[in-house]
Image (cartoon, rainbow, N blue to C red):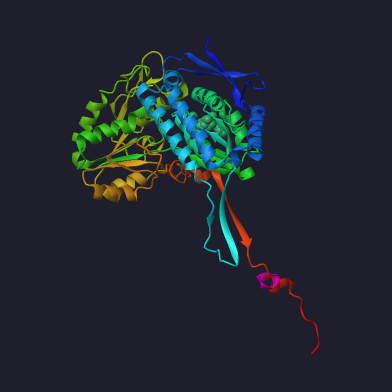
Amino acid sequence: MPQHYDLFINNRFVPAVSGETFESVNPHNGAVVGRFARAKKEDVDLAVASARKAFDEGPWPRMSGEERGKYIRALADKISEHTPAWLPLEVEDSGGTVKKLQGDFWVSGNHLKYFSKLAEHALDDTLSDATREGSSKNMIVRKPLGVCAQIIPWNFPLMMAVWKLGPALAAGCTLVLKPAEETPLTAMLFAQAVQEVGLPEGVINIVTGYGEEAGAALVNHPGVDKVAFTGSTEIGKLIMGEAACTMKRVTLECGGKSANILLEDADLDIAIDGSLYAAFFHSGQCCTAGTRLLLPESRKKEFLDLLVERAKQIKVGNPAEKSTDMGPLISQKQLDRVLGYIEKGKAEGATLLLGGHRLFDSGFYVEPTIFDNVTPDMTIAQEEIFGPVLSVITYKTEEEAVQIANNSIYGLAGAVWSKDTDRALKIARAMRTGTVWINEYHILTEKAPFGGYKQSGIGRELGPDSIKAYTELKHIHVDELKSREKKFWYDALLKPVSLSKT
Ligand code: ADP
């Protein structure tokens, strides 16, 4: 019998008001992993009311940043403590390989520790230059923004939860988190850790359910002050529009179509393996995936031969086996979508060099797939596929490479591979993306911002400013003149006009 998980509202586990549930399935074999409460509007109302009360009346926004930091640190420690138990369950729920999830869990704990430290000084007041002794004091004050709805995707379930709730908690906000319906498991395990840590009631609420039900109810809720979303560009745009009704603050981290540029002086061994990692890590289900590989015409054949040879060595299979490099896609929907793009690539005239088929009789597996002779206008060069499909595009000059890289509605990430760092830096600066790696890929640090240009999103996560996205700025003017006659408005408006005749 699959385990049943309730919603987490006001530090208690409660079933959905309707009593309805939905199932998450193991992408490796389609087996049911867990049964989850299906939150709808009435449940979202309860979760928001709980977060609202915790924000408006509870201790969380009122305690010192240092105290909040201690709670966040305790949550980070819970991730390390529970990793051995949670990780195998997450393999089943998300289809992530053991290798990938070991990284995710470690990073999630570390990032949460970083947010716990940021909490200590997040809301320190500063004085503005406008302050004049004896005249006025002008304080710039940061206050927690309020109740936040946090909607996350299925590709990095725990890490995305941490990126959202970490800075929100540090700033003193309260929140309602909605994990993706495909991967609700780790969020509910994390809820157990919230109970263990004894976080004040209502600070973290977690509702499982569908995007168009629970997600939409959160986005439309008048009691929510901000929506932080990671997911598709399509839904990101929808959320931005809906949020306008109540002028909620929004941060969006959406799609990508990252260009990965190999210069002719790149170190071949590193650049080719790095490019495979860029494209095929987590079966290409990363918003930063390097799905457009730009090769110099002068060395294309040599680069491409090695790429295909090495790609054949990628071990695709059961993600629970430690030696597996690439696991399944998340769902049947995603499998159909990816196979559809492969057909489109062929139909538009790209050359299928490797893969292109579904693998195995069960599970949502697709082979690592490489297309050559892709032109920048083709669908597979423009649209985000979110699967293991790499499009190879050839360029003649560096200028052309930059132009092709920037020819996208997206601007999330990209990379340049070269032995000449100055040369690579020039290209990195010209690329219109939020992250550029030089001789590296996918690596992120909690100490630098992450987010996109153009239709890849709005705002940044991680980095020292990440908490600011969960605050409102306030100016407090303290008058120190203490004399009515000295005030600028006295002359202008209220000074008695002398009507005496001369
Ligand atoms: P993907 O295409 O990667 O599945 P989505 O953008 O559809 O990504 O989903 C990302 C998250 O957004 C999920 O938690 C999903 O439930 C949620 N979501 C989907 N549709 C909506 C919506 N209309 N309003 C709010 N949230 C939504």
The overriding secondary structure of the stretch rendered in magenta is: helix
Q: Is residue 352 inside the magenta stretch?
A: no
- The span picked out in magenta is 483-488
Q: Which residue corresponds to the image point at 60% horizontal and 32% vertical from the top-left?
A: 200
Counting from the top left corner in percent of width and height, residue 442 is at 35, 36
Specify whether residue 193 is in view.
yes
Residue ID at (61%, 59%):
477
Q: Position of residue 295 (x, y in %)?
A: 25, 39
Query: In this orientation, does residue 350 appear?
Result: no
From the viewer's perspective, tell me whether residue 470 is left or right of residue 410. right
Q: Nearer the viewer, residue 466 or 238?
A: 466
Q: Quadrant of residue 269?
A: top left
Q: Between residues 377 and 363, which one lies in front from this camera angle?
A: 363
In the rendered view, tell whether residue 281 sits above or below residue 502. above
Looking at the image, which residue is at 50% across and 32% down?
152
Which of 459 and 114 lies nearest the eye of the viewer?
Answer: 114
- Residue depicted at 30% across the width and 19% down the height: 323
Is 33 placed left or right of 60 in the picture? left
Give how far across and how far down residue 27 sits, in percent. 44, 19
Q: Is residue 229 left or right of residue 224?
A: left
Name the quarter where the C terminus is drawn: bottom right
